[in-house]
Each structure stands twice: as structure tokens, then as C-alpha cells.
Amino acid sequence: MTSEELADIFLSGDDYYALNKVQDYLKTHTRKELFQELLTPAMYRIGQLWQENAISVADEHLATAICDFVISATDNRSQEEKENAGKVMIMGFEGEDHYLGLKMVACVFREHGWTVRYMGPNLPLAHALDAAKQWKPDVIGLSAALVSRLPLVKTYMDAFRTLEPKPVVLLGGRAVALADLSDATAEGAVVLKSLETLQHWIQARKESNHEASA
């Protein structure tokens, strides 16, 4: 199955057929491949069709809802948190309504034994800061699909640097993948261009922790 075919299935409105096709795909592919090679390009395709007025806003919302359903239905939480690898809060910047990428990131962390608090998109900084003070995550993941959200990177990072203990801040999303965030990395943020780079980061952290404990 190709991402174009999956995009057509999403647009058809048949959620259970979409789920069956994705479950068949997972029999021979990893969840990372599902997210990176199938779901993400399928939704990019749908966004392109919407920009070209080839589909309506209602069509785009329907496809997004079915993609959301598929991600949730294939998120195997029976194996989550077994390794106690750490705690991660995942959220979108204030004004950022895109959330499918956030859910994919949450799934990847769960697969690697992390305790996840998925806070959703469009989380105002004051509420994000309060939640982080109470829960004390090891990592905070932020996503920006819209370039207009990038000016908030420094604001959020400045706020999160006041936390004790200081969490690692991960930055991802479509806008982040296209932007130059060297200033943010200089201040300690980790910029992740794809889910593959996220997996590499998680694995490297795991190996580093094992070496430290040894």
C-alpha cells in the first residue's frame, strides 16, 4: 500500500477499512515505518489537495479524524512503561492546532518504555509550566507545524529553563524541520527533523544511561 492509496482511503470515510489496511501493513513493517513512510506523507498529500481546492475543509477534517482513529487504535499500550525509561510531556505551542505528529511521537516514546503525558496541541505556556512543575518530566517535547509558531520557541525554552530539575527540550514538527534553529540548539534544545532522528535520540539516551549506571 502506498501513502497515496491510504490518503484516498481516508478521504473515502471508511475508518474500519483504513484500520484493517494499516494493521495488515504493520504485519510486515515497524510502527516507525507506518508513521514516517505511510501516515505522514498521506496527510501531507491531503493537505496539498486542500490547498489546491481539490477537496473541501470537511474532507480534510474527515481524513484527519480517521488518521487520528488509526493512530489510537494501533497504539499498543499493553507494553508501555515497562522499562521505566523516563517521563516525557508532549505538547504543541499555543496557537498550534496540528496534533497528529504529537500523537505519533507519544507512541514512539511509549514503545521505548517511557511514561508519557500527552498534553495535546495549543497548550498555553502558563499551563504547560504549571504542569511541568508538578510532574517534573525528564523531557518536554514541543511541536510546531506552522512557521508562525517558531517565534515562541525562545519564550517556551526560557520558561522551561526555570524548572528544577531542568528537562531536556525536544523540538519537532514540519516547521521545525524546515527552519534554522541553531540559536535554540545553542541554548540546549534538541532539534528532531523526523521520527527516525527521535528514535536515534531515544536509543542514544538509553545507552548513555546504561553506561552511567554501570
Image: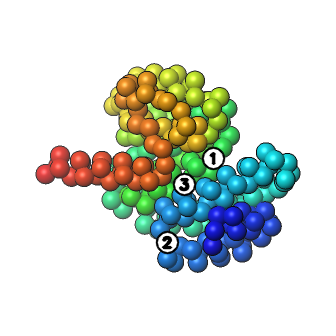
Figure disc tally: 3
User: Viewer-proximal residue, 147 or 141?
Assistant: 147
Judge the density around disc 3: few (<14), some (14-19), many (≥20) Cα neighbours within 10 Å: many
- Which is more N-terminal, label 3 or label 2? 2
- Is 15 on the left or on the right of 115, as rendered? right
Where residue 19 sits: x, y (%)?
A: 66, 71
Which kind of residue does numbered mark 2 sit on?
His
- Is 156 on the left or on the right of 46, as rendered? left
Which kind of residue does numbered mark 1 sit on?
Tyr
Q: CA distance from mark 2 to mark 3?
A: 15 Å
Q: CA distance from mark 3 to mark 1?
A: 9 Å
Query: In the displayed structure, would residue 44 be above or below residue 90?
Result: below
At x 37%, y 29%, the residue is: 188
Q: CA distance from mark 2 to mark 1?
A: 23 Å
Query: In the displayed structure, would residue 184 be above or below residue 142?
Result: above
Which kind of residue does numbered mark 3 sit on?
Met
Q: What kind of element bears circle 3?
A: helix
Query: In the displayed structure, would residue 180 be above or below residue 19?
Result: above
Judge the density around disc 1: few (<14), some (14-19), many (≥20) Cα neighbours within 10 Å: many
Q: Which residue is mark 2?
A: 29
Where residue 131 sits: x, y (%)?
A: 50, 35
At x 40%, y 46%, the residue is: 87
Task: Please give the label number shown on residue 99.
Answer: 1
User: Viewer-proximal residue, 1 or 64?
Assistant: 1
Q: Which residue is mark 3?
A: 104
Judge the density around disc 2: few (<14), some (14-19), many (≥20) Cα neighbours within 10 Å: few
Q: What kind of element bears circle 1?
A: loop
User: Viewer-proximal residue, 132 or 76?
Assistant: 76
